[in-house]
Amino acid sequence: MKKLCYLYRVLLTTLLGLILLSLPGWGAEEGKTPAPQAAKPEAATPQPEQILQQMCDFLKSNNQFSFKAECTDDRVYTAGKKLQFAFDLEAYVQRPDKLRINAAGDLENKQFFYDGKSITLYDKSHNHYAVMEAPATIGEAIDKAHREYGLRVALADLTGSNACALMTAGVKHALYVGEGIVRGVKCHHLAFDKKNIHWQIWIDAGEQTLPRKLIINEKRLPASPQWTAYFTEWNLSPQISESLFVFTPPQGAIKTKFVSLKEMAAQQQKAAPAGKKKPAAEKEKKGE
């Protein structure tokens, strides 16, 4: 009887050991509960201002380059209807003081010259040209042409050293839209909102952060006309002759004159009906 009790206790102890070894946390190493893995941090959303600045810095690092662009321009007519016209553009840049832009298409056939001393605009369709004195750098020359004469040259803002300052002036909101494809090129899609315009740009996501597409929407104008450019044939080491930036009047070309914004305002004031004019004293009183 004692022998049976002893065998029973041995058997019970053995079974209890087997049960304990089968429980989680006991026995072999592979039975241990694995430690939880740390969650991978989410990638930060790219900042549109930083990507745009990278593009500007890259362009600024190249003292000489050229590109072409395929452009479309909406024109609004009766009852808010829009017509779209196209033109091809080519630009040649030699910093700090040389710029040439040619535009030819449905409504445009003009050439812009800047040689470090003067700006010349040539209307090839009518064989007319006008010349103005200009400051010593591309950015300053473009700024004067716009500020004093209201002259805007397509894509000229990209050619100066202050491109980003011009593009972001007055921006109220910026958005990183995401990645997109422009004619087979992977790009960062950015959007910027100003008071009067909303514009988008697609910038190459590779090492050469070049603009590939640009859209400008005139949101305050009737029917919100849109202007679009697809950039093609970027060349960062073009062979450019100095003569390219010098305008030589073709035979029979007629020289005209740039009219400043002040001169235009004075002419409009002079041509206005007598009842519409305001005495100078009244303007000063109202701070106009």
Image: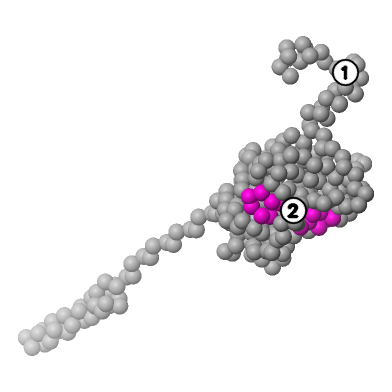
Numbered badge on residue 245: 2
Residue at 68% over, 55% down:
93
Above-or-below relation of 227 to 28: above
Residue at numbered disc 1? 276
Asked if one can make out residue 165 in the rendered structure from this viewpoint, the answer is: yes
Q: Is residue 85 left or right of residue 94?
A: right
**Residue 195: x %, y % from top left:** 69, 37
**Residue 284: x %, y % from top left:** 73, 14
Residue at 79% over, 54% down:
102
Q: Is residue 74 left or right of residue 44?
A: right
Q: Which residues are magenta?
A: 86-104
Residue at 92% over, 19% down:
273
Give the structural element (helix, strand or loop) at label 2: helix
**Residue 241: x %, y % from top left:** 72, 60
Amino acid, disc 1: Lys
Give the structural element (helix, strand or loop) at label 1: helix
Report if residue 92 lies within the magenta region.
Answer: yes
